[in-house]
Amino acid sequence: MKRHISFLLLLLTLSLVSGCAALTPRPPLEYRTGAQVDTLSAAVSLSITKGEQGMGANGFLLYQRPDRMRMVILSPFGTTLMETVVAGDQITVVDNSKRVAFRGLLAELPQQGEGDTWRQARWVMDVPPPGNSLRDGSVERTNSMGLKERVTFENGLLIAKSLSNGDEAHYNDYVVVNGVPLATEIIMYSHNGDRFRIKISEPEVNAELAPEAFTSHLDNLTLYPLSALQGK
């Protein structure tokens, strides 16, 4: 369950940097229309509830538009337990506790399990740039993935979306950093009763990130193809 949780929550973090949206504070949040996150570094806390099981973790996130991201999950002592690096269409998942890594193309993810997790995350990620859509209210639409959904906006920011199967995503607790509105909490409620939450803190937006920040170090690790992820 640990790998599934970390992988899901990693991908959910993408939604923080895809034209983010969040609950509008009072007075309305002031931001630049269309302002987007080009780079992000932040501390993150993650939690998941599946039935009667629940767990949480802390770590950090690095992101660079359009397609580079690194999520590190830390132990209570500050050592790296797991990390995932996305670069273009390639993903690397590292489990330091077992000294193994998995690498392959995102398209190679299986149809169930981790693959379905990725599709859920892509739905959460599919949000418009702030201020470029409906100002306030709700509307039904067909999104870029071909799914029919209901979306709700406040102050030009997406605060909630839902599918007919019962999946919901909520975008909360905005801050503005360098003129860019950033959702610092995202909660997803799955139709099967699961709940996923990610919270970010200490965000730095659009600061320069070194290219090596997105490099996986696989020395002394056993490397498997991504297709083997579910079986490990």
Image: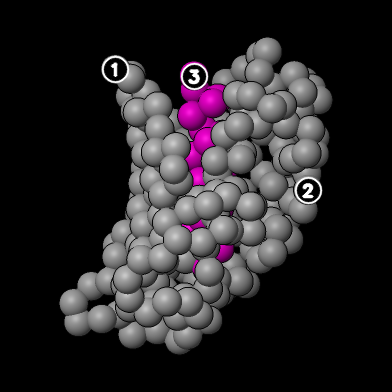
Q: Is residue 20 left or right of residue 185?
A: right
Q: CA distance from mark 3 to mark 1?
A: 13 Å
Q: Which mark is residue 212?
A: none
Q: How far from the left and from the top, in percent, is residue 148? A: 53, 52
Residue interval drawn in magenta: 1-19
Q: CA distance from mark 2 to mark 1?
A: 35 Å
| Quadrant in which residue 92 is drawn | top right
Q: Amino acid at mark 1?
A: Glu
| Quadrant in which residue 225 is drawn | top right
Q: Is residue 110 above or below residue 145?
A: above
Q: Residue furthest left?
A: 26
Q: Is residue 16 magenta?
A: yes
Describe the element under mark 3 as helix, strand or loop: loop
Which residue carries the number 2 mark? 89
User: Which sits earlier in the primary sequence, circle 3 or circle 1?
Assistant: 3
User: Between tags 3 and 1, which lies in front?
Assistant: 1
Which residue carries the number 3 mark? 1
Which residue carries the number 1 mark? 52
Q: Residues within 10 Å of mark 2 (few under 14, many from 20)?
A: few
Q: Is residue 77 visible?
A: no
At x 79%, y 33%, the residue is: 108
Q: Amino acid at mark 2?
A: Asp
At x 44%, y 43%, the residue is: 164
Q: Nearer the viewer, residue 63 or 207?
A: 63
At x 35%, y 53%, the residue is: 170
Q: Is residue 144 visible?
A: yes
Q: How far from the left and from the top, in percent, is residue 91? A: 73, 41
Q: Is residue 135 above or below residue 51?
A: below
The answer to whether the residues at label 3 and label 1 have Cβ atoms under 8 Å apart is: no
User: Which sits earlier in the primary sequence, circle 2 or circle 1?
Assistant: 1
Q: How far from the left and from the top, in percent, is residue 196? A: 39, 38
